Amino acid sequence: MKRYIALLRGINISGKNKIPMAELKKAFEKLAFEEVKTYLNSGNVIFSSIEDDIKRFTNQIERMIKNQFELDIPVFVISREALEDILHNAPEWWGNDNKEIYDNLIFIMPPAKFSDVYDEIGEPKKELEKIADYKEVIFWSFSRKDYQKTNWWSNTANTNISSKLTIRTANTVRKLVDM
């Protein structure tokens, strides 16, 4: 049995796209996923399956959300092993204990690629933020006090590419791997 993490994009934010986590957990169990857990109220679901077909899982979950909750929510599914590999390959400047820096992991939803994201958002402001790509993610760190001055802060939410991204903090990602 293999462990997976499903990241739902843009749910339970500012009263939009509401999905109760208890109902979401039950819906995952009805899809025959096992050991289902949710984390936080922002669409993080950890589950196990004997099957190994991330594309099929993604399609099943998106259809279930559409049918049960009447929402079109993009979903990013990744194996725990793949997420562990990503964390092991994080740049040394990402995810440390510096309280002045905010560390995020941007998950790029297929078929989008890093080049698509970079072309849309552009250069990070070197004095305020750093990015590095690895496989289907972008490590992104920025100054907490100057986040509104960064290039990527507003552009990850306000560009055509935003629907192809879902973002989690370094702490959230570490917790998901441990669950």
Image: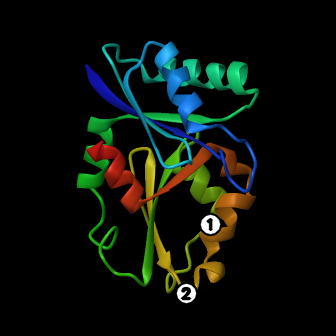
Residue 147 position (above or below residue 3): below
N-terminal label among 1 and 2: 1
| Residues packed near mark 1 inside 10 Å, few (<14), some (14 to 19) or many (20 plus) | few
Report the disc number at residue 145: 2
Position of residue 147 measured from the top left corner of the image (x, y, whole percent): 59, 79
Residue 10 position (above or below residue 123): above
Query: Spatial distance from mark 1 to mark 2, Cα to Cα?
Result: 21 Å
Quadrant, the N terminus = top left
Badge 2 marks a residue whose secondary structure is loop
Task: Report the coloring of the rendering.
Answer: rainbow
Residue 23 position (above or below residue 150): above
Q: Nearer the viewer, residue 2 or 18?
A: 18
Q: Which residue is mark 1?
A: 122
Which residue is painted at 54% across and 33% down in the image?
22
Q: Nearer the viewer, residue 158 or 69?
A: 69
Q: Farthest residue toward the front? A: 22
Position of residue 130 measured from the top left corner of the image (x, y, whole percent): 45, 73
Which residue is painted at 55% across and 87% down in the image?
145
Which residue is painted at 56% across and 30% down in the image?
24
Position of residue 157 measured from the top left corner of the image (x, y, whole percent): 69, 59
